[in-house]
Image (tube, coloured by chain):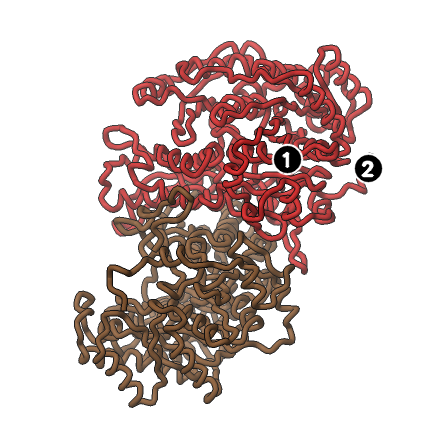
Chain colours: A red, B brown
């Protein structure tokens, strides 16, 4: 174990690492020179023609990394994702990471970087955390171009008879900027447009981000963009991007962004980092194109989904895997002793103290997620992501519980030891995949009614005893049925902290119902968002934003990204 | 002459062209592999270390392309810039283009592309006109991160005692979006920030764009960013980026954008396309770093400045060349028969008819710009950019006028013929440079008083008989002197259509004064903006935006960019 004194920051580890030219990483994957579009020496986009060339090749196995409900103690899901791929690579397997790309908002706000951690990171860490290859900027631009075209349409005569009180399309910035949550635009008289209430979301909350991550190719992207509902007209009929005629321009703005980004881990394992939608109002997974391309290029794809298994994995399995016809071979459920103790009632300040009783109480959260993955018919392994503060007794208690329940489990120390620290997990996974075939199927049929689909998720995944629909939601269900929008998967917008819709209920709450307050149709993405509470779609900055620690040194190297 | 039927669109010509891998273009310039950061196969960023490596090399000659006052008839200044470099290249000279990069706002609004035209274009035209290498997105992000940090500072207790009525920093989008010109932000109660009036500019109007284009290196960029005045406090004292502590983060966000972008013309002439500030509230030239790097890499740098010589060239010479210690060897003044006829009173609809009398009347506009360039002590050539509709008699009349006045002149047909059509101009330029040495010096001393500097520009460049300062401007002059801000160059914000501040006065107006209504301190850029009228810093979209014609074909190629 390292002492505190020796602990290096993620940025320090990343900057001290040897990084290979991206060409060499591409060569590992037999990518043709014409297919590789370098962005500097260490990043590249991959042409979509890769998919045509490898059309007949059998897909690699998709491994989904998910977690227990997140706590302030941290689970290290991204770190395990990267570390597991490094470990498979170390075992001689052709493994590829497929991950989401970070938003600048959290990076400059509170969270710091989002590219793994310690010795399980993707490189170049600074670039990935800053503008990367510009995908988020392209999405921001497409989103805001659509908003400008919409407001211009109204200003120029409003031929579509858009009701300015019923515009659902919002502008975005890829920043945490609370002052833009609620605004009034179009002020200043008749030359400056039509005044109306509006608001900005963070880019990753844009429906275009969700579409970007679910589209199978450029033409599918265009078809989905055309389907976005941006407003309702004076007769309360939906107005779409196709009505405005903007789908061509929006697709054009995304034509390069849609190509997956190739980078590498600290141990030179290839990584495709592409797209990054919210995991509450959207489905929280990297792009379908990146996952499918990774499966063509490698034998094992290690990918992750946002938040815990109740949000991220549920959506990966019910939305992404269904739409993209991806069959996950196995699921890794990441847990930490610290987080399980919090689920067992220990406050954050006392997590460093051994508390086996609380740990054992908190395991019920893990147990529920195991049941969920079993319900989808996918084999799984629990990964216990070790922290320096975990006591021997605590680790033993967790392992013993797993053994007694026949739960496949492995310890990982990838933060500290990189791929070497993930070898046990990798070996366990290979063993499970070898022994058990995935019987994956989604939890519900899309042709079921909206309430039936929501209930299937709430009961099977959350352990709720039922669902209450608020009057607004009930009215919307009728409208959506009348519009022919009801045969779509459901995207639940729920707190990530609890299995219930009450974020204070940790562990495994029982005897609860969830309440769906309203729905939002994401017709371009192809799902209906069910809101169980107020979901923050534009974060604010903390009193001391992370940005104020950022700088460059005299050689132009990044400082202060964590 | 081609018949109308045969005329191809710029996009068509660009897409039919053969384009060389950017590596080959870099090899022409002896750029080292480590200095070339490719962005795809046809674009690259050049490391700033190029400047260190070539520190002792003598600079190439800088040729500035400017024009008469623009009219709706068009002058083709960018086209001549590209075509001239192609012609020099064709003559065996090591020539490089240094140009501004386009904003998406006009591209998606009305103007279409901005990368030359016809057979004098830079490639890849679609990429340059869309996101290019992301520089404008990086500037947008830095600008808006600063705004978010500022509003967050106020929300979190406002330690700096910022007067929310006196915030001068605005948010930006790189789009034409009139509905954002005047907005109210921070609505929704105490959790959503502090309500205040605000507005959005287009990105190219951001002071960060001006700073980006005037900075000499990363440390100078940081120093300039720190100096931006974002607001005034309750005691009316300026609040800067340094007071907020955000300069490190902003510099970090610009660390890759600040590297110049290498592309090529249709004839494989190297082109550095980098930065693009407004030419009214800012100085309207590509980055200093690109111009200086081009001068290290080539023997001839062909660069341009925005609008006519009264705005663009004046600022290139008084601001950019002064700050960056660039000595322009010669100036090209672009004129067209059509535009001169408009200056001579012909309405747009009748420009296709021969009208030598109107042409001769309109030449006075050209004559004034010639006198201006002479006042700066720089040799010049008039480039007559031929159009199909120009009559033989009109061309002869213009040439005769030049000959009679001893004005060096050359015809160009670069739009139609590429470099071949610019050979006469290139040869004339080489002759002039050979015969006459540049005696360049700026028109005024920065240590002169603010009114003296404004008057120097108004009298010498515009031909005004004097300057009126509105009461607000007079009060600001006193404040700026008290703040020690008076020893900075002046950046005039004036209509581009007239030598006067009244856009309806074409030709060469006489017996007029200009009125400075107010000043804006751009302390990061290092100049004081003098506003003579209301300057539009956020364009609107037309009834049928160009974006609605944009699309992709089945192979992912751009359609509808003009």
**Can see residue A10?**
yes
Residue under label 1, please give it: A96
**Which numbered disc covers residue A386?**
none
Q: Secondary structure at mark 2?
A: loop
**In contact (CB < 8 Å): disc 2 and disc 1:** no
Q: Is residue A232 above or below residue A330?
A: below
Specify the subunit that label 2 lies on: A
First along the sequence among labels 2 and 1: 2
- Residue B115 position, x and y percent, is 40, 61
The answer to which of B4 and A443 lies nearer the viewer is B4
Q: Nearer the viewer, residue B466 or A364?
A: A364
Question: Where is residue A142 drawn, in percent x and y?
Answer: 41, 44
Q: Residues within 10 Å of mark 1 (few under 14, many from 20)?
A: many
Q: The residue marked by circle 1 belongs to what chain?
A: A
Position of B324 compared to A67: left or right? left
Kind of element beneath mark 1? strand
The residue where tag 2 is placed is: A2
Asked if labels 2 and 1 share a chain, the reply is yes
Q: Position of residue B124 (x, y in %)?
A: 45, 56
Q: Name the residue located 32 percent from the left edge and 57 percent from the top edge.
A: B9
């Amino acid at each position: 174990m390292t002492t505190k004194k020796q602990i290096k920051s993620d940025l320090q580890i990343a900057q001290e690492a040897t990084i290979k030219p991206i060409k060499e990483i591409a060569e590992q994957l037999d990518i043709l020179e014409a297919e590789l579009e370098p962005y500097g020496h260490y990043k590249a986009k991959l042409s979509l023609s890769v998919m045509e060339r490898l059309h007949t090749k059998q897909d690699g196995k998709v491994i989904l990394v998910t977690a227990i409900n997140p706590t302030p103690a941290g689970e290290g899901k991204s770190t395990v994702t990267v570390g597991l791929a490094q470990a498979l690579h170390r075992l001689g397997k052709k493994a590829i990471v497929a991950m989401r790309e970070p938003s600048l908002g959290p990076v400059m706000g509170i969270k710091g970087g989002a590219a793994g951690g310690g010795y399980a990171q993707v490189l170049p860490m600074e670039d990935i955390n800053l503008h990367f290859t510009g995908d988020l900027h392209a999405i921001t631009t497409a989103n805001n171009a659509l908003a400008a075209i919409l407001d211009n349409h109204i200003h120029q005569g409003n031929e579509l008879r858009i009701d300015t009180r019923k515009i659902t399309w919002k502008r975005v910035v890829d920043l945490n900027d609370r002052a833009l949550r609620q605004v009034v635009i179009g002020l200043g008289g008749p030359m400056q447009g039509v005044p109306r209430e509006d608001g900005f979301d963070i880019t990753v909350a844009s429906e275009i981000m969700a579409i970007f991550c679910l589209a199978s190719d450029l033409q599918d992207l265009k078809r989905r963009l055309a389907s976005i509902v941006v407003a309702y007209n004076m007769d309360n009929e939906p107005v779409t991007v196709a009505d405005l005629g903007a789908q061509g321009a929006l697709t054009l703005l995304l034509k390069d962004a849609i190509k997956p980004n190739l980078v590498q881990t600290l141990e030179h394992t290839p990584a495709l980092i592409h797209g990054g939608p919210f995991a509450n109002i959207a489905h929280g997974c990297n792009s379908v194109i990146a996952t499918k391309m990774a499966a063509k290029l490698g034998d094992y794809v290690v990918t992750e989904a946002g938040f815990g298994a109740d949000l991220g994995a549920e959506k990966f399995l019910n939305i992404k895997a269904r739409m993209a016809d991806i069959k996950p071979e196995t699921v890794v459920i990441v847990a930490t002793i610290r987080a399980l103790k919090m689920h067992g009632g220990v406050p954050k300040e006392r997590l460093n103290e051994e508390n086996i009783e609380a740990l054992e109480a908190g395991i019920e959260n893990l147990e529920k997620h195991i049941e969920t993955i079993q319900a989808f018919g996918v084999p799984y392994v629990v990964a216990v992501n070790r922290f320096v503060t975990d006591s021997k007794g605590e680790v033993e208690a967790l392992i013993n519980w797993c053994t007694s329940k026949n739960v496949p489990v492995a310890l990982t120390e990838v933060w500290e030891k990189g791929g070497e620290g993930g070898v046990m997990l990798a070996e366990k996974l290979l063993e499970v995949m070898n022994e058990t075939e995935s019987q994956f199927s989604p939890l519900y049929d899309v042709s079921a009614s909206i309430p039936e689909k929501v209930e299937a998720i709430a009961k099977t995944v959350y352990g709720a005893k039922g669902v209450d629909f608020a009057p607004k939601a009930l009215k919307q269900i009728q409208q959506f049925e009348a519009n022919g929008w009801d045969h779509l998967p459901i995207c639940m917008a729920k707190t990530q902290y609890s299995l219930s819709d009450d974020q204070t209920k940790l562990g495994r709450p029982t005897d609860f119902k969830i309440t769906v307050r309203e729905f939002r149709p994401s017709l371009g993405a192809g799902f209906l968002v069910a809101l169980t509470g107020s979901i923050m779609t534009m974060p604010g900055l903390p009193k001391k934003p992370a940005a104020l620690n950022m700088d460059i040194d005299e050689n132009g190297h990044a400082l202060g990204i964590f």
